[in-house]
Image: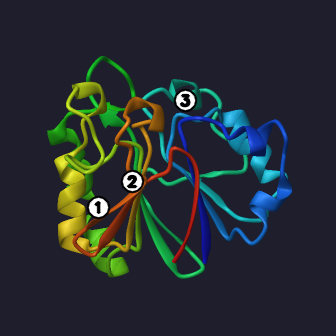
Amino acid sequence: MKIMALADTPDRMLWDCLDRRLLEGVDLILSCGDLPAEYQSFLTCFTRAPILYVHGNHDESYCIRPPEGCLCAEDRIITVQGVRVLGLGGSLRYKPGPFMYTEREMAARVKKLRFKLWRSGGVDVLLTHAPAYRLGDQEHISHRGFMAFRDVMDRYQPRFMVHGHVHKEYSANFVRARSYGETTVINADKRYVFEI
């Protein structure tokens, strides 16, 4: 399965120029948040691939107008062609906002999903907005990751964790993909394609 992951910044080659070759062979699109709803809705017109999304910390507008034709994966396990995707959007709370959580709140979200995770036999992809703690995050609280995501990876060993939130421009030492145990952790900043 060919998966396109998107996060934070609309890709000019997809939205402005609409290079349809970039969508060829894509079976699933994962949106990691902080993208305009219109951008994701636009893409549904040019691909048959389902688009699953989670909320970023700046996605308050989704409360009024969510991306049309896309599936919200928040606190759900969605299976596409046998690939199980668990969605946990939002970031660490650094100011008031609907998609910001304390570490304890995120851990509680994960705990509520334990029966679903057991019933599904785990997950293949952990789809988040924020990174996991010390796996591509930054020191400042606004871009610090969640320890709860490391716990999910330790316990369920998904093949991939895909996140956004930390833009490539934020660091000269940006790393697109890294390993954590059995999981490949991918920062989807703008656009990234991988296979499972």
Give the secondary structure at mark 2: loop
Which colour assignment does the render follow? Answer: rainbow
Position of residue 62 in the picture relative to residue 117 (left or right): right
93 over 12 or under it: above or below: above
Mark 1 = which residue?
A: 113
Check contact, mark 2 vs mark 3: CB within 8 A. Answer: no
**What distance separates the C-alpha of mark 2 from that of mark 3?**
16 Å
Mark 3 = which residue?
A: 63
172 over 53 or under it: above or below: above
Say which residue appears at 73% left-offset and 37% top-offset.
Answer: 12
Give the secondary structure at mark 1: loop
163 over 36 or under it: above or below: below
The amino acid type, in three-letter code, at marker 1 is Leu
Q: Position of residue 104 (x, y in %)?
A: 14, 41
Mark 2 = which residue?
A: 75
159 over 54 or under it: above or below: below
Which of marks 3 and 1 precedes in the sequence?
Answer: 3
Mark seen at residue 46: none
Q: Position of residue 145 (x, y in %)?
A: 25, 42
Position of residue 149 in the picture relative to residue 190 (left or right): left
Instruction: Quarter of the image for the N terminus: give it.
Output: bottom right
Work out whether residue 166 or residue 85 is closer to the camera in this orientation and state it: 166
